[in-house]
Image (spheres, helix red, strand yellow):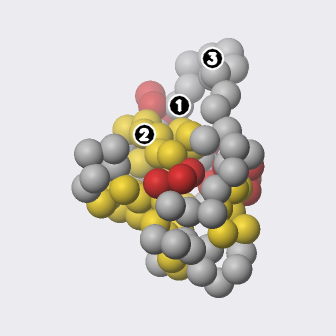
Amino acid sequence: MNKFTKDGIVVRKDGIVVTKDGIVDELQDNIAVFTFRKKDGTIREMVATLAEKLIPEDMQPKSDKPIKENNEVVRVFDTVIQQWRSFRIDSLLSVNGIGIHDR
């Protein structure tokens, strides 16, 4: 398992701490590549963003109604399949090609 806490924190192999808030902040203006292990054990790579300009208008959130927060899960827009997806922080294997400790 990753070095993970209930606060949604993992540590990359280069020593950089990755948090849900950090991921969300970075994706507001950028695209990142996430590799993670799905619940069924398969490995998935996802190219994702939260940048409004990169999400098709018909796929953008329809209201400002808050979504139930979960510090362990990040909801993102997959730019390859053009759909909203989510992943668990503790399932991350790498972010932009840099591995996560203990994986």
Q: Is residue 33 visible?
A: no
Q: Is residue 50 above or below residue 83?
A: below
Q: Residue at x 53, y 31 (%)?
A: 60
Q: Earlier in the sequence, mark 2 or mark 1?
A: 1
Q: Residue at x 47, y 40 (%)?
A: 86
Q: Which residue is mark 3?
A: 63
Q: Earlier in the sequence, mark 3 or mark 2?
A: 3
Dot 2 amino acid type: Arg
Position in image of residue 77 (x %, y %)? 47, 44
Mark 3 falls on what kind of element? Answer: loop
Q: Which residue is mark 2?
A: 85
Labelled disc at residue 60: 1
Mark 1 falls on what kind of element? Answer: loop
In the image, is 91 to the left or to the right of 62? left
Dot 3 amino acid type: Ser
- For disc 2, the neighbor class at 10 Å (few under 14, some 14 to 19, many from 20) is few
Dot 1 amino acid type: Gln
